[in-house]
Image (cartoon, grey):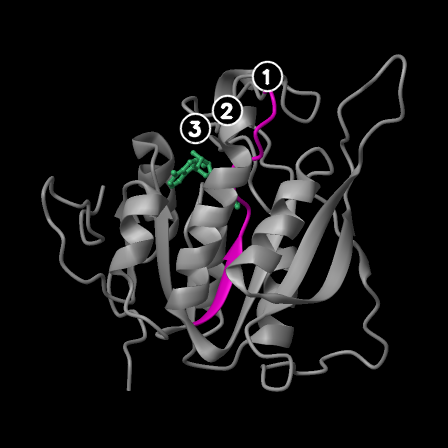
Amino acid sequence: MSDRQPVIPAGDTGTLSPGSIYLGDALELLPRVPAGSVDLIVTDPPFAIEFKAQRMNYNRTGSNVIEGYREIPGEDYAGFTRAWMEEAFRALSPHGSLYVFSGWNRLIDVLQGLEEAGFCTVNHIIWKYQFGVFTRKKYVTSHYHILFAVKDPKNYTFHKAEHYPEDVWTINREYWKGRKKTPTKLPLELVRKILRFSSSSGDLILDPFMGSGTVPVVAHEMGRRFMGFEVVEGYFRFAQGRLPEGDFPTPE
Ligand SMILES: C[S@@+](CC[C@H](N)C(=O)[O-])C[C@H]1O[C@@H](n2cnc3c(N)ncnc32)[C@H](O)[C@@H]1O
């Protein structure tokens, strides 16, 4: 396994550099990202629900699901959300954008956090997926919320890549049959769509809660620079294994 991408040594407080992913707590690492240096943040933070990483995953055995998922207690979620969003706002460039994923249970905290941190919400996107968890006495949840927010509503990147880009996206989760996976991996196609609309070649893309590393993987594939954080070592190593060794796009 490659060790090219850094694991933060204890006590290190230096500035973080693009083209790397880091093992550590986003609340400690975000303040070390230079102010105004990031063009786009795409992130799917922990959602503060009773979540079992070893559950039956997509109707299949849980034995391929890597354990250790870090959750935030419900009572801490509003404060946690506000804290990371304020740092995200500081790290973003004046024309920067943020896409944040949320389930419906904690959407109120996410919307409030965005407003308190100073963001302007441009779109509320619904992502419709398959494989909602089976229920007996309620409807099966098969959608996610994605809030598209910017620092400056008069100046942000938006490449109109489709003629009529609607705010309801039907994109299937990926089957990773028989392969190791983290429990909440985003589809590559979904992240590609976000980067196509809201970033340009060479932009710096950050995911402070990167899980399996889908956002850095797509950023690299599309010729963007990336930075990512993950607090669970097993997930960090998994993400590391998905990224090529070296030759990452570097700042001009
Ligand atoms: C919903 S998952 C992200 C999944 C990711 N989008 C993917 O495609 O795999 C949220 C991730 O945040 C991590 N996490 C939780 N608290 C964290 C913290 N304080 N700092 C960094 N990562 C954290 C969890 O371990 C989990 O992997």
**Is residue 46 on the magenta stretch?**
yes
Regarding residue 174, the answer to whether it shows in the image is no
Q: Secondary structure at mark 3?
A: loop
Q: Secondary structure at mark 2?
A: loop
**Is residue 154 on the magenta stretch?**
no
Q: Is residue 153 above or below residue 220?
A: below
Which residue is identified by label 2?
Answer: 73
- 10 Å neighbourhood of mark 3: few (<14), some, or many (≥20)? some
Q: Where's residue 24, x and y in %?
A: 28, 41
Amino acid at the residue labelled 3: Arg
Q: Nearer the viewer, mark 3 or mark 2?
A: 2
Ligand 1 closer than 8 Å to label 1 CB: no
Residue depicted at 54% across the width and 76% down the height:
199
Give the CA distance from mark 1 to mark 3: 15 Å
Q: Residue 246 vs residue 80: left or right? A: left
Which residue is identified by label 3?
Answer: 70
| Mark nearer the N terminus (1 vs 3) | 1
Q: Residue furthest top?
A: 136
Amino acid at the residue labelled 1: Arg
Which residue is identified by label 1?
Answer: 55
Regarding residue 107, the answer to whether it shows in the image is yes
